[in-house]
Amino acid sequence: MVDTAHTYVIVGAGPAGLQLSYHLQQQGADYLTFERGAEPGGFFRRFPRHRRLNSLNAVHTDSSDPGIRLRYDGNSLLNDDPELLFSKFSQEYLPAADDLVRYLAEFQRIHQLRVRYGTTVEQVSREDDEFTVRTDRGVVRARCLVVATGWGRPFVPDIPGIEHATGYEEMDVDPDRYTGRRVLIIGKGNSAFETASSILGRASVVHLASRRPLRLAYDTWHPGDVRGRHGAILDSDRFTPLHAVLDCTIDAIRPVDGGFRVSITDTHAPGETVELDYHEVLRCTGFRMDTSLFDASCAPDMVRDGRLPGLRPDWQSSNVDDLYFAGTVAQARDVRHAASPFIDGFRYNLRTFTRLLRERYDDVPLPAATTSGEPASLTTVMLDRVNGSPALWTQSGYLCDVFVRDDATGDFRHHEDLPEDYAVPRFADSSHCYTLALRRGRADGSDTDRRPTRASTVIHPVVRRYRHGELVAEQHLPGDLLAGWRRPDRHVEPLVRFLGRDLADGS
């Protein structure tokens, strides 16, 4: 391949790489995407191992509004074809991974994205404000490099004898393989529970073990925590002596008599150690990003035990200019606070990300509408947004709309779907900057009442006013179990009053 240069080079054609490619192509940007596989979505061709997704696919809803329906569609990519929705590929509420693979291939086929398949990126270096991307088919230069490779390697905890455990990525998924056997699963995330659920009716003993306590999505509101469909193992933990979920430190794994002896220390009784014997030890401890493609000139700083790249608020590497990350690996700014690791979250991040890239590298202004500064008009725009936006819904507490006042006219510039930690410093020169977001819980975290008449753990709108980057006022509107915020007495009038008082203040 002849040496070429592009403004944007994307590495990886999974859901994030395809979504970003689509947005850049729609705007006529100069980009090229590399994918080592012959087709898109290589990760999902192999994972999850038991081939059932956790992402919800609510095909039947009460609304005909496409934006509202996307709130409950965990797998579709954003695009201008109303027929290219994941619901056309599966009607299952918890769909099969193979259906997502088919969907991604069709997304690529219909939009004819500029993806170079069968091309492995071997090394990336940086010199003279551009990247050199070396592949097994030649060299390409890039002004901006976006890594959308997803998880590239298993995360292997530092446990003596961990090499004796069989990794999630290579374990036998045939349940009969574990019939009558004592099985230890290291980890208490979804991959561990997925594995435990598959062998629960075959194995004689199933233990799931890790240091941190179990986190259930039902309790934490975080979609990456353990999902309710794995409840059988929890019932077994309570009602039989056979299976258990253990909070413990695994001190060592040793081969003994054709099996394994595992030393553990109880988290809740420090110093209390026990040895247990198992036929199988399975490692289900998650993944990390593969950084082997970067040379020393552009190696990104890593966070979260080396699993994720550190990021600036615009998804740029914390230490390498013009290096960005997209998709699952671009979650360091909002770990456990939003849905950024998942398709239904990062599809909106990437729409905003595209706008930021185009502004920086192609001099395309960041989109903004003009909104009247009259309190009733501003209230109408704000409530229309929280009632109709799937981005603010899915990325609650992370993405927000921003309203920046023009002091000369009194009108507001309205920017949609910006990360709040990006927006506040960007518009720090403004005396009146409002952010509008959906959030859970009160500002002080004290209210756990789930009644729809209170600003509680039920998702609800919050307006914050910043003056020169400093938070000076905040208005919570009551939650609603049906996610509708238009009641005159509870939503409209309180917001009009808040905005009227604040704007009249003049400070």
Image (cartoon, rainbow, N blue to C red):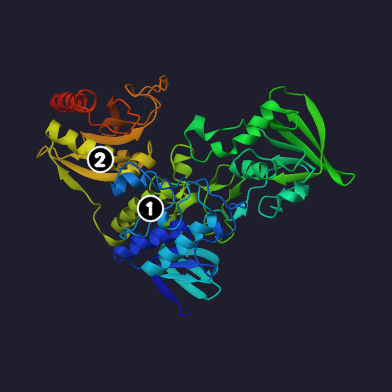
Q: Nearer the viewer, mark 1 or mark 2?
A: 2
- Inspect the image, locate mark 2, and give the three-letter code of the amino acid beneath it: Arg
- How busy is the neighbourhood of tag 2: few (under 14 within 10 Å), some, or many (20 plus)? some
The quarter of the displayed image where residue 262 is located: top right
Residue 385: mark in rendering: 2
Compared across the picture, whether 128 is left or right of 120 comes to: left
The quarter of the displayed image where residue 493 is located: top left
Q: Which residue is mark 1?
A: 350
The quarter of the displayed image where residue 362 is located: bottom left
Residue drawn at (30%, 31%), measured in percent from left and top? Answer: 461
- How busy is the neighbourhood of tag 1: few (under 14 within 10 Å), some, or many (20 plus)? many
Judged from this view, the residue extending furthest toward the right is 257
Confirm whether residue 70 shows in the render: yes
Confirm whether residue 31 shows in the render: no
Residue drawn at (72%, 28%), measured in percent from left and top? Answer: 240
The C terminus, quarter of image: top left
Quick one: 301 or 485, which is closer to the camera?
485
